Image (cartoon, rainbow, N blue to C red):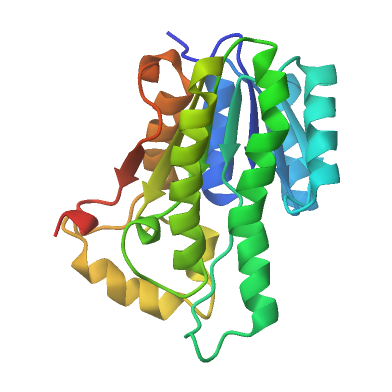
Amino acid sequence: MSKLVGKVAVITGGARGMGAAHVRRFVAEGAKVVFTDILEDDGNSLEKELGDHARFIKQDVTKADDWATVVSETESTFGPIDILVNNAGISMNKSLMEITEEEYRRILDINQVSVFLGMKSVVPSMQKTKGGSIINISSINGLVGGAIGYTDTKFAVRGMTKAAALQLAHMGIRVNSVHPGVIETPMIAQDDAKEAIQEFAKFIPNRRIAKPEEVTNIVLYLASDDSSYSTGSEFVVDGGLTAQ
């Protein structure tokens, strides 16, 4: 049985990688999905593939005005929002002494500020349905140390999730974070990270890198009514890496 029939979802960073896996699965499970990204060609292609239950909107997730547009267009196209997946993010494998202030602030805006803006923007829409589910994609680097900038912001996402969960619980809105480990996405193929990720993967107890769909399974659970009593929690998808 489809788990998201009648639900309206917004998914950021949805044009490729993990985000695209989430979009495809949500549509397959009966949701109507607005997905956003800065990758316009990839977004338009995925929208064409998925048909009438998916709509792509080009969005800069760091801009409040763009968030207002996404919420407005989602409501006019599909109705009030039931689900938000804050998936957009970037990484950079530079040391504390190498990273510039400009680079650091860019990571902060995309990985952290966008999550704040997303949650703040969708709550009035979710109140129209008397509930909702917000899923913030953090990382295992929101639990343990890693690259400067990326780790900082992913810890912040974890903290924002808990704070928002407590503040929104009385509205029937649940907020949880997902913490993927090493996942097979375009992000880990970046020239500045690829070698380090390949070396890191040797230490995964499950001895493999995960497929995006394995993260999607957890995101789907949190988006659906199956997780109706879960809020303010971390859900780890890392092949046992942080259990060591």
Picture coordinates of residue 189, whole percent (x, y): 50, 69
Left or right side of 15 for 85: left
Residue at x 41%, y 42% (from the top left corner) = 178
Residue at x 22%, y 70% (from the top left corner) = 202
Residue at x 51%, y 91% (from the top left corner) = 97
> Image quadrant for the C terminus?
bottom left
- Is residue 221 something one can see in this rendering? yes
Picture coordinates of residue 86, whole percent (x, y): 58, 42
Q: Is residue 26 above or below residue 117?
A: above
Left or right side of 159 for 74: right
> Image quadrant for the N terminus?
top left
Picture coordinates of residue 154, whole percent (x, y): 47, 57
Residue 229 location, quadrant: top left
- Taking depth in this image into account, of 50 and 177 the one nearest to the observer is 177
- Taking depth in this image into account, of 24 and 74 the one nearest to the observer is 74
Residue at x 72%, y 42% (from the top left corner) = 36
Q: Is residue 176 above or below residue 239?
A: above
Left or right side of 110 for 143: left
- Is residue 14 something one can see in this rendering? no
Q: Is residue 73 above or below residue 93?
A: above
Counting every numbered tag in the picture gives 0
